[in-house]
Image (cartoon, rainbow, N blue to C red):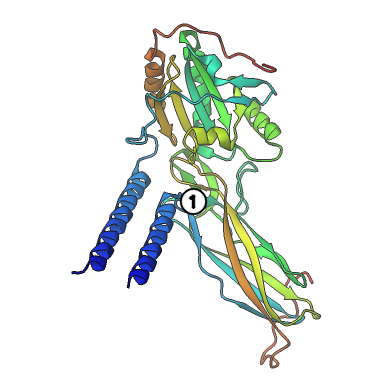
Amino acid sequence: MKTSNAKLIAALAILTAAASAQLAKPKPKVTFAPVSPVKITRGGTANVEFMFRVVPGYHVNSNKPNSELLIPTALHLDMPTDISMGKINYPPGKDQSFPFAPDEKLNVYTGDVSVSAMLSANKDITPGRYRVHGYLKYQACDDRACYPPTRLPIAFDVQVVKGGPKPVHRNPAQSPHVHS
Amino acid sequence: MNRNTTVLMVVIFVVAGMLLTGHFLSKRASVAPVGTALGAADPSGKLAPDFRLKSIDGKSYRLADLRGKAVLLNFWATWCPPCKIEIPWFVELQKQYASQGLVIVGVAMDDDADKQKVVADFANEMKIDYPVLLGNDEVADEYGGVDALPTTFFIGRDGKIVRRFMGLAAHSDFEDAIHAALREGQSTQAYTAPLENVQGK
């Protein structure tokens, strides 16, 4: 009984420390939905979509902000050997003015943002599960202040298979975003 | 109720209390309006941490050398649109209050590899005629992290912080704070050297 109580107390202490550390950290201005595992056949391609949410009250620069001084929102992925990524598709931002500069329009993302990319697997790749790590770099502001550029880590799995049943209908010959 | 159960309940009570306190403090911090001096976290009355930083023209500046002057210390970055609103005000306020003993110092928190050029180009474009220093994380940590930009400290002649604004504040708030900084420590006139180039000291 004593041992189990000690374990419980230790677990609670760890939980408390973790919760306190979490509370002390600045709250993130952007969150992302977990990315479902991507299935891809050897020599094939697959689209992967990343869903980010800008916390209400904040905005982040779009991927193509109106000024070169502004830091664009950009996705960076470290791809495993034999899996490559084509062009990343960012949605257009929204031109918006803010109380700190009512006469100036900034091109920003607010709310839910979907970014996609086409992955392609080499035909010689060994089938199996590959973990992809990366981050979304963004720089957020609210109506009166801006916050330092931040990297939001992301990770997802790519399941490479030998080749499934033949598709019922064929996709267009080639996506313009694929660089194989 | 045996001893073990009592111990367990005390631990749960303490943990719950800590979590609630943490949650309350976190909430309070997150709803503190930007642009106003903070309550419990207000650094007013504390001595402004000293630092030595390089300016965009390669000179080295030390805050302590400004003792005897009122200092407006503005943390900003080229990627921060609200910061761009304040800078022309500071250029104007420097002209207006320099003769009374005000010195304005900008600390750019850009993190680019070529930040000296980026910041210098921006400063030229904005016609900044007060010293612009290249900030770093160590100095930011000394000043409470400087997580929101712009953040502006008003320092009295005695080197003590008079007021702090996090986020864009009104022009009139800056003037009030400048008056307060010029008044504060007015008897401390022991050293009134202008912002001095201390390169090589």
Q: Is residue A161 left or right of residue B85?
A: right
Q: Chain of mark 1?
A: A
The image quarter containing residue A88 is bottom right
Return the x and y of residue B20 as percentages of the image width and height.
29, 54
Return the x and y of residue A117 as percentages of the image width and height.
66, 68
What amino acid type is highlighted by mark number 1? His
Q: Nearer the viewer, residue B29 or A20?
A: A20
Return the x and y of residue B156 as percentages of the image width and height.
42, 17
List the single residue furthest toward the right: A124
The answer to whether any part of residue B89 appears in the image is: no
What residue is rendered at 68% in x and 21% in y? B59
| As drawn, B76 above or below A11 | above
| As drawn, A53 above or below A162 | above
Q: Is residue B83 left or right of residue A124?
A: left
What residue is rendered at 36% in x and 49% in y? B26
The residue identified by callout 1 is A59
What residue is rendered at 61% in x and 59% in y? A135
Return the x and y of residue A108 as percentages of the image width and height.
53, 52
Name the image quarter holding the C terminus of chain A. bottom right
